[in-house]
Image: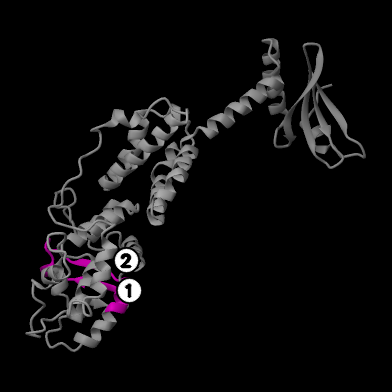
């Protein structure tokens, strides 16, 4: 008599294990502990064998019968179901050991001792965020060039072409490591040469992520080492924190600061795009502004950064360039260049391109999006600007 689901569900444990038979060699073994295990008894090459199909109710009666029929077909083809299961398990383990994520972590472990710790962490994070979600579980030898390109294109589409190029380079290294260890036939990134968008030059000299800490250290010593003005130092720090244009910094006024919302509201007439702009103020920016209140809080002009020669005027447009020259960075960066530095680092740390562009006040001028929303993505922008300020603090902004 065949089993019913009710019989399986109501089976009670006894002092010793016992069996409830369904037919065709399938039975449910009820253990003294209360566990109920599906087993199938069969003969192969004249020898009696058993195969487990899992526990009830995780494996239902119907599923157990399906497993039995599948195993019976394997037996009818002259193969031992137990051995086939072992072979399939081994194959799954091989595929896991050969998947992209496992091999990428192996490659990273081989290389990280040759890198600076921060760089090693950046490489790992970029792969985790941009490559592993799609490619991680894939056997590396099964990944196609088109599949890899679709992953890289997603990075490009969020406005991070430099990061896209780097992810491609990392993937190339992973594939070459897989070739060297016998788990891939070739580096498929060779097929994608020229497939990514070329990186456009900004036209402005700017510092790379690696060069930024050294500059910030010199800026922190602007008074002691270069006999520079404290107001100029603060203005430069505020410009880097907010990454607005130098003219917008020089024209900043105290009545534009919204202390309650922790925002700097720049009026449209002072913006290049002639649209009002909001700069979320991180904790570090608020602290800096409070220091500035002691210097220019009662300025007759209302400027946060007044001219030291003519207090009723704003800071000179040559102030930042002169400071850059004094610190030995002439030709290496400009005031505007820090916008490029910030944009590059934020893009490479997976902030959304639209959010970064809005914070840069790169308004879209086409007719489709003619209405500029100065408050667009404001919550994300607040979070991003705090991350940026924390990052700058970590690499030397004081």
**Above or below, comparing residue 154 to residue 395 in the picture:** above
Residue 210 location, quadrant: bottom left
* Residue 44 image offset from top left, x and y in percent: 77, 14
Mark 1, residue position: 284
Question: Who's the residue at 67% across and 10% down the image?
Answer: 77
- Is residue 139 visible in the rendered image? The answer is yes
**10 Å neighbourhood of mark 1: few (<14), some, or many (≥20)?**
some
Say which quadrant the N terminus sits in. Answer: top right
Secondary structure of the residue carrying numbered label 1: helix
* Residue 125 image offset from top left, x and y in percent: 41, 50
Secondary structure of the residue carrying numbered label 2: helix
Q: Earlier in the sequence, mark 1 or mark 2?
A: 1
Furthest-right residue in view? 15
Q: Is 204 situated left or right of 238 in this image?
A: left
Q: Is 10 situated left or right of 243 in this image?
A: right
Could you say which is closer to the camera, residue 242 or residue 262?
242
The boundaries of the magenta stretch are 263-288
- Is residue 279 visible in the rendered image? The answer is no
Could you say which is closer to the camera, residue 308 or residue 108?
108
**Above or below, comparing residue 375 to residue 312 in the picture:** above
**10 Å neighbourhood of mark 2: few (<14), some, or many (≥20)?**
many
State the separation of the CA atoms marked 1 and 2. 10 Å
Residue 392 marker: 2
Callouts 1 and 2 close, C-beta under 8 Å:
yes
Q: Please tell me whether mark 1 or mark 2 is closer to you in this view.
A: 2
């Amino acid at each position: 008599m065949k089993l019913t689901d009710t019989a399986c569900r109501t089976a009670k444990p006894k002092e010793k294990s016992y069996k409830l038979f369904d037919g065709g060699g399938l039975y449910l073994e009820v253990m003294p502990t209360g566990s109920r295990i599906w087993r199938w008894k069969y003969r192969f090459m004249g020898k009696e064998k058993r195969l487990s199909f899992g526990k009830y109710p995780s494996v239902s009666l119907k599923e157990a019968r399906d497993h039995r029929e599948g195993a019976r077909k394997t037996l009818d083809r002259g193969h031992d179901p137990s051995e086939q299961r072992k072979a399939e398990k081994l194959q799954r383990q091989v595929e896991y050991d050969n998947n992209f994520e496992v091999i990428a972590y192996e490659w990273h472990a081989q290389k990280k001792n040759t890198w600076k710790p921060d760089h090693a962490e950046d490489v790992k994070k970029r792969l985790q965020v941009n490559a592993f979600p799609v490619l991680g579980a894939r056997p590396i030898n099964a990944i196609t060039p088109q599949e890899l390109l679709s992953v890289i294109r997603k990075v490009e589409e969020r406005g991070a072409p430099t990061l896209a190029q780097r992810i491609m380079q990392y993937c190339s290294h992973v594939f070459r490591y897989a070739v060297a260890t016998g788990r891939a036939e070739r580096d498929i990134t060779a097929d994608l040469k020229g497939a990514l968008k070329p990186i456009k030059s900004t036209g402005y000299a700017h510092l790379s992520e690696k060069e930024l800490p050294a500059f910030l250290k010199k800026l922190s010593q602007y008074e002691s080492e270069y006999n520079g003005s404290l107001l100029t130092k603060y203005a430069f720090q505020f410009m880097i924190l907010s990454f607005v244009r130098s003219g917008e910094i020089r024209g900043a006024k105290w009545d534009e600061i919204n202390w309650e919302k922790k925002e700097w509201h720049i009026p449209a007439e002072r913006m290049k795009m002639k649209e009002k702009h909001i700069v979320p103020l991180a904790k570090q920016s608020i602290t800096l502004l409070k220091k500035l209140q002691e210097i220019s809080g009662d300025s007759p002009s209302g400027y946060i950064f007044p001219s030291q020669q003519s207090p009723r005027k704003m800071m000179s447009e040559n102030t930042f360039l002169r400071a850059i020259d004094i610190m030995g960075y002439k030709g290496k960066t400009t005031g505007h260049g820090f916008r490029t530095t910030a944009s590059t680092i934020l893009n490479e740390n997976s902030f959304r391109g639209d959010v970064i562009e809005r914070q840069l006040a790169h308004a879209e001028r086409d007719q489709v999006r003619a209405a500029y929303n100065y408050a667009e993505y404001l919550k994300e922008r607040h979070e991003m600007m705090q991350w940026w300020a924390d990052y700058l603090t970590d690499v030397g902004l004081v």
